[in-house]
């Protein structure tokens, strides 16, 4: 384990002792949110991103360790494992280097070189590699053997060259020469597949495209790879062939002998037939991996911002899933998000029942004491918002437009069927729209993050890596906010540190059978929730109005005694200490530091006592589009319009200005200075003002700028 800590420390710049402590906590079964929040002394206050990186690197090193054992045992079975070779393999932690070392010993299929060896031509290849001045034809004639399949001098020489070519291709130095060339000179080229010009129109930008691989951004590379996967493009990666070959020849060709000429022919064959395709495959894989990583980073940031969207809170909501022909589906929810009523209205063409629909809205608002209205941002959203605002509702009833991305996925899911077995998908979708306004995080955890629709090329990236990153993001957000133990759904509880689907369901079942939890310690009575799970989850679960005031804070039960001592020293109760700022101001953190409790922990406790159970999410802000701009035809270059950021990619962001077409702000139009990362400029669902650069009504495209 120490060697892992040393390697990870060197790669990340994090102190080795911090890495060791983190790996030790992970090995004990501690979760990333728990370590980040409650084990700062041990890790030196590493954040979740750093801890997750250590965890990922540790897993990769475990995979390399496993691969090394396979390599060692395979070579040992061949009787070729020397002490020097064993030492070199044990000391290497580079996956590419390990495969290069292993290449000469790797069991081979029926290659041309292997067939030549079976014909007894390896000694001839050895002689040629020494590049003596012996007559080559005379030496080769000694290996003619029709029984073994060598009928002529030419066949003997060709077999020897095949053996030499394979050796060249397996030579570490040779492979590294070609890799270095690709690193500096490789270009990626994309051509349209023959006869696919019309069908592959959406990939037109890549019909005849060449770019230096090192400069190709992730969105372009993934676009080309998607075009290739769909059969519209032919994509290749190549280096400087002439320079590569020159360097290889200088390595293997020693003189001007006849044998040296034979070696030169073998080297050229090795490069074209074996080395170049192999290294091209390597670079195709590594460039794809890098593009995947870049795209996943954007996806993760978008998802985090979406999950951490400001909540309205516990309000009675009228939710509307807008539509034209099929009408607008209405649902009324109580302050806990429970469905009270549902029906449909038809205020838009072709029905146009505005008066009847308006009266129905008023009736529902009065009957269910509605406090806010949530409108999905899909089809007919703008028209529905205008209709609602035309009703002159009381100012106390705020109207919001919320993202409905993934709502259709939820409405048809098993989760939705379990929640609303007696209602169809339209009702379920409308309920989701309403709940997203009340608490986006609690509702969005029910949807596969891959279906939410933020990011770029999520279907094209490594799905295992994407799933891991997205799951970590959801876990991070849920634990960052914390959940109410007595109201949280099993879906939300599943993501709490130390729990999972089974224990989350057991908590819900226990709650149903025994009533609301009155103390965190009661969690220990839940089946399958043992001491370790309690340690991991307790600090992230809140109990409002319980016996212990600290149960509604992020103070961990293991630290309650510290707060109780503080209260005792101040001559007050814990509740009084939490509610009276003047009592806390006189507390000296150093007075409560011990060999078991560090200053960081005490400072975190005091910080939490200032704002117990605070929600890290920002307050919800109302937004309105420009009332004079309703369709793309209303938009003119030069206009400055209010908008909402709906998606962020590596090449810019998309902004909704209320015209049913999302406008693109290219990365070059995001700032007056160079922008490398769009997420450093804007956030998902951020309210912005944009300038219109270009309007293309025919192609339904809108170009915008943040440079006003």
Image: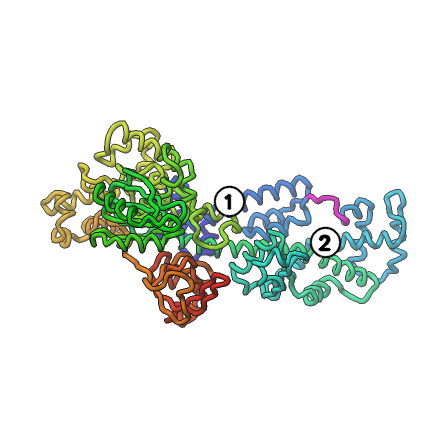
Q: In the image, is residue 12 above or below residue 118?
A: below
- On the question of residue 647 being in view, the answer is yes
Name the residue carrying label 1: 62
Looking at the image, residue 344 sits to the left or right of residue 368; the answer is right
Q: Could you tell me which quadrant the C terminus lies in?
A: bottom left
Q: In the image, is residue 447 above or below residue 125?
A: above
Kind of element beneath mark 2: helix
| Chief secondary structure of the magenta portion | loop
What is the CA distance from the residue labelled 2 to the residue labelled 1?
A: 30 Å
Badge 1: residue crowd in 10 Å (few <14, some 14–19, many ≥20): some
**Is 108 one of the magenta-colored residues?**
yes
Whole-percent x, y for residue 270 in the image: 73, 57
Judge by depth and name the residue closer to the eye, 353 or 271. 353
User: Which numbered disc covers residue 288?
Assistant: none
Q: Residue at x 81, y 55 (%)?
A: 127
Q: Residue furthest top?
A: 513
Q: Which badge, 2 or 1, comes first in the chain's sequence?
A: 1
Callout 2–callout 1 Cβ contact below 8 Å: no
Q: In the image, is residue 18 above or below residue 688?
A: above
- On the question of residue 18 being in view, the answer is no
Q: Residue at x 14, y 45 (%)?
A: 567
Name the residue carrying label 2: 167
Whole-percent x, y for residue 489 in the image: 32, 38
Q: Which residues are magenta?
A: 107-112
Looking at the image, residue 102 sits to the left or right of residue 131; the answer is left
């Amino acid at each position: 384990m120490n060697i892992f800590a040393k390697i990870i420390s060197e790669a990340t710049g994090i102190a080795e002792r911090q890495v060791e402590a983190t790996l030790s906590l992970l090995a004990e079964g501690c979760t990333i949110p728990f370590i980040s929040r409650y084990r700062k002394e041990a890790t030196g206050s590493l954040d979740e991103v750093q801890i997750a990186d250590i965890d990922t690197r540790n897993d990769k090193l475990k995979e390399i360790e496993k691969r090394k054992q396979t390599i060692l045992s395979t070579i040992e079975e061949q009787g070729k494992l020397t002490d020097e070779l064993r030492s070199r393999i044990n000391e290497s932690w580079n996956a590419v280097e390990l495969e290069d070392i292993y290449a000469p010993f790797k069991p081979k299929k029926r290659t041309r070189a292997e067939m030549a060896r079976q014909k007894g031509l390896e000694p001839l290849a050895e002689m040629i590699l020494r590049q003596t001045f012996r007559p080559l034809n005379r030496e080769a004639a000694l290996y003619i053997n029709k029984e073994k399949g060598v009928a002529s001098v030419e066949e003997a020489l060709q077999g020897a060259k095949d053996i030499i070519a394979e050796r060249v291709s397996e030579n570490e130095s040779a492979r590294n020469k070609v890799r270095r060339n690709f690193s500096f000179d490789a270009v990626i080229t994309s051509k349209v597949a023959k006869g696919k010009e019309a069908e592959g129109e959406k990939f037109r930008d890549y019909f005849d495209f060449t770019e230096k691989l090192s400069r190709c951004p992730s969105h372009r590379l993934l676009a080309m790879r998607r075009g290739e996967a769909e059969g519209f493009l032919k994509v290749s990666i190549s280096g400087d062939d002439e320079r590569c070959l020159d360097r290889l020849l200088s390595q293997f060709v020693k003189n001007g002998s006849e044998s040296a000429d034979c070696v030169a022919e073998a080297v050229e064959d090795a490069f074209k037939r074996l080395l170049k395709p192999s290294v091209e495959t390597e670079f195709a894989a590594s460039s794809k991996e890098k593009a995947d990583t870049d795209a996943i980073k954007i996806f993760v940031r978008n998802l985090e911002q979406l999950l951490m969207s400001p909540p309205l809170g516990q309000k009675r909501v009228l939710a509307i899933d807008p539509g034209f022909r099929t009408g607008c589906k209405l649902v009324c929810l109580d302050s806990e998000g429970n469905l009270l009523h549902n029906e449909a209205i038809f205020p838009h063409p072709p029905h146009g029942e505005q008066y009847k629909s308006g009266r129905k809205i008023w009736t529902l608002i009065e009957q269910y004491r509605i406090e806010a209205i949530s409108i999905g941002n899909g089809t007919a959203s703008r028209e529905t918002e205008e209709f609602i605002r035309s009703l002159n509702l009381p100012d106390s009833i705020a109207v919001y437009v919320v993202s409905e991305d993934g709502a259709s996925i939820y409405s048809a899911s098993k989760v939705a069927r379990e929640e609303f077995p007696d209602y169809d998908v339209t009702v379920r979708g409308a309920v989701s729209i309403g709940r997203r306004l009340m608490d986006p995080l609690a509702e969005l955890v029910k949807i596969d993050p891959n279906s939410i629709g933020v990011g770029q090329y999520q279907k094209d990236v490594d799905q295992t890596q994407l799933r891991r990153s997205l799951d970590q993001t959801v876990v991070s957000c849920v634990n960052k906010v914390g959940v109410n133990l007595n109201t949280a759904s099993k879906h939300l509880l599943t993501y709490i540190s130390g729990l999972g689907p089974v224990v989350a369901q057991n908590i819900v079942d226990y709650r149903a059978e025994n009533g609301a939890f009155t103390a965190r310690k009661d969690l220990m009575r839940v089946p399958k929730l043992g001491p370790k799970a309690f340690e991991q989850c307790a600090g992230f679960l809140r109990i409002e109005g319980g016996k212990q005031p600290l149960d509604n804070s992020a103070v961990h039960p293991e630290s309650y005694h510290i707060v109780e001592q503080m209260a005792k020293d101040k001559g007050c109760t814990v509740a009084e200490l939490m509610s009276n700022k003047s009592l806390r101001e006189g507390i000296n953190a150093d007075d409560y530091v011990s060999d078991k409790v560090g200053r960081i922990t005490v400072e975190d406790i005091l910080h939490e006592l200032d704002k117990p159970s605070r929600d890290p999410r920002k307050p919800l802000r109302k937004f309105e589009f420009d009332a004079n701009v309703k369709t793309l035809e209303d938009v003119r270059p030069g206009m400055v319009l209010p908008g909402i950021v709906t998606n962020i990619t590596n090449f810019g962001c998309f902004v909704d200005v209320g015209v049913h077409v999302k406008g693109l702000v290219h990365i070059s139009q995001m700032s007056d200075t160079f922008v490398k990362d769009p997420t450093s400029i804007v956030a998902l669902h951020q309210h912005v003002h944009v300038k219109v650069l270009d309007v293309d009504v025919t192609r339904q495209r809108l170009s915008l700028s943040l440079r006003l």
